[in-house]
Image (cartoon, coloured by chain):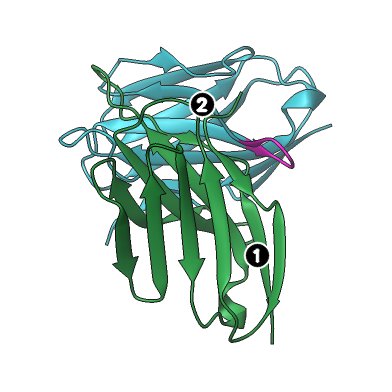
Chain colours: A cyan, B green
Amino acid sequence: DVKVTQSSRYLVKRTGEKVFLECVQDMDHENMFWYRQDPGLGLRLIYFSYDVKMKEKGDIPEGYSVSREKKERFSLILESASTNQTSMYLCASSSLRQAGQPQHFGDGTRLSIL
Amino acid sequence: SQQGEEDPQALSIQEGENATMNCSYKTSINNLQWYRQNSGRGLVHLILIRSNEREKHSGRLRVTLDTSKKSSSLLITASRAADTASYFCATAFVLLNAGKSTFGDGTTLTVKP
């Protein structure tokens, strides 16, 4: 069965820390995505990647970076965490073979920055 | 601004009733997808409808698409308490490397037993 795994369900960090959120998919998907979800704002795309070492900015990339060294793993990095980055972070993947294909989501990481 | 906007924002019904949620979007699309999200979990894909399709069924789900009005609806028939969740539409416009979809803000459905 299709699986997207996010390393932590809950995470608490301090302002100024460098934070790593990890996501692994086992479907050999080309596309991977990072979203944040806030009440009343829906899902907003932070970054996505359509191939190893390739990345493109989404709608809200400021304060974030990403890394994709292997096809199955897509990491989101908060360079210097701030309280306004407290949110639910969702990772997803999809197949490039047919563009516009459904995305498969992990269960999310609820990140709190104190 | 978001491509897809769901309406209503919240819907509360009794078990056994039908639930209808609507989605409007702004630009041309190749397909539209509906997802479900249980509280505190990730999104789960429900159904995809292509721009050349008008209606699609999957179990108790019925999706319609009207590209002239740039709108879609999701109907859940004979609702159950387990259908309580948030429902999102997502639109995809296929460009060179775009596997992206743009999500709306969602409709929160509560089904009372």
Residue B87, image x and y in percent? 56, 56
**Spatial distance from mark 1 to mark 2, Cα to Cα?**
31 Å
> What residue is drawn where x is 56% and y is 76%?
B18
Stretch in magenta: A37-42
User: In percent of the image, x 64 and y 13: which residue is there?
Assistant: A63
Q: Chain of mark 1?
A: B
Quick check: B95 left or right of B84?
left
Q: Amino acid at mark 1?
A: Leu
Q: Residue A19 placed where, x, y %?
A: 62, 26
Whether the magenta-drawn stretch holds residue A99 is answered as: no
Horizontal side, residue B31 vs residue B43: left or right: left
Q: Residues within 10 Å of mark 2 (few under 14, many from 20)?
A: many
Q: What residue sits 48% from the left and 60% below the top? A: B74
Residue B93: x %, y % from top left? 33, 27
Which residue corresponds to mark 2? A76
Corner quadrant of residue A30? top left
The outermost residue toward the front is B68
Q: Residue at x 56, y 15 (%)?
A: A61
Could you tell whether A42 is left or right of A13 in the image?
left
**Residue under disc 1 on the same chain as residue under disc 2:** no
Residue B60 in the image: above or below residue A49 = below
